[in-house]
Amino acid sequence: MNEMRRVLAGLMMAGMLAMSGTAFAQAAPPPPPPPPSTTPAAPAPGAQRPAPKPSTPPPPASSDSRGSIVITGGVAAVQHVGATIGALLAFRVADRVDVVGEAAWAKDAVTRRRVEAATSVASFLQTTQGKAAVGTIEAPAFYGGGGIRVMLSGGSTRPYIIGTGGVARLVLKPVFTLAGTDVTTNLTQYGITLGSDLTGEVTKPAFGGGIGVIADRGRWYVDASFRVLSIQTEGQATNVLRAGGGIGFTF
């Protein structure tokens, strides 16, 4: 009996000690660990520092070797003044030097010599028929060629000189009226046969040159120029003066 009481007393004492330890643990929890430091640790003496990462290089500047195309319009004159339109394609091949190809059309590139020849035919017709006669002629011109364009300075506004060579075609379109009636297709019945200086088509070498200025507006630009085109027609060169401007785009 006494032995049982001692066992019970020991069990009660152990339970009380366990309960008091649990309460103490709940009342005072351990402090949280400090946050990890974000400052990198200093390297040990004699240790090699890691090499810095190479910075990303900036994007390359746009190349000067760009192409461009411009559509132009203006006036052209030989003996008469008429409209002209054209297009020019250019590719940069060196600093301030472009290779160009162009096509152009002029409404009337007739020379004084052809105008005088048409007037002579009309005078003969009037004299022989005793009626008023008028003779006119128009010569639309088409040109295609290539050459070199050289910029004289840099910057957003650039003057230039240009020289080209190629082939031109003239289409001769005479008109003769007698007493107000068109008789162009019936001249043979009046004893008149037109020569190659007044009718037909003429294809000849042509050479041109001129000056101009380009004003950049981003990838678009304005081009103004004055040009001379010399068509090597038989007996007398046909020199076409062209002045105008246009809008271009670089690519």
Image (cartoon, rainbow, N blue to C red):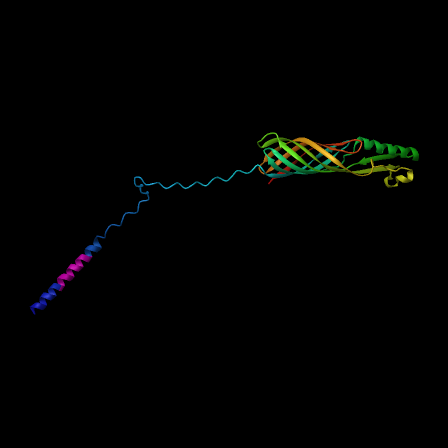
Where's residue 113, x and y in %? Answer: 81, 31
**Which image quarter: residue 26?**
bottom left
Where's residue 19, x and y in %? Answer: 18, 59
**Which image quarter: residue 56?**
top left
**Which image quarter: residue 22?**
bottom left
Identify which residue is drawn at 86% across, 32% down: 120
When the figure is inspected, residue 213 is found, relative to residue 26, above or below; the finding is above
Q: As drawn, is 70 to the left or to the right of 115?
A: left
Disc tally is 0
Characterize the magenta stretch by its predominant secondary structure. Answer: helix
Where's residue 36, x and y in %? Answer: 30, 47
Instruction: Find the magenta span and give its range.
Output: 11-22
Position of the N terminus by quadrant: bottom left
Q: Is residue 249 on the magenta stretch?
A: no
Q: As drawn, is 94 to the left or to the right of 21?
A: right
Q: As drawn, is 90 to the left or to the right of 176?
A: left
Position of the C terminus by quadrant: top right
Q: As drawn, is 163 to the left or to the right of 6?
A: right
Outermost residue toward the bottom in this view: 1
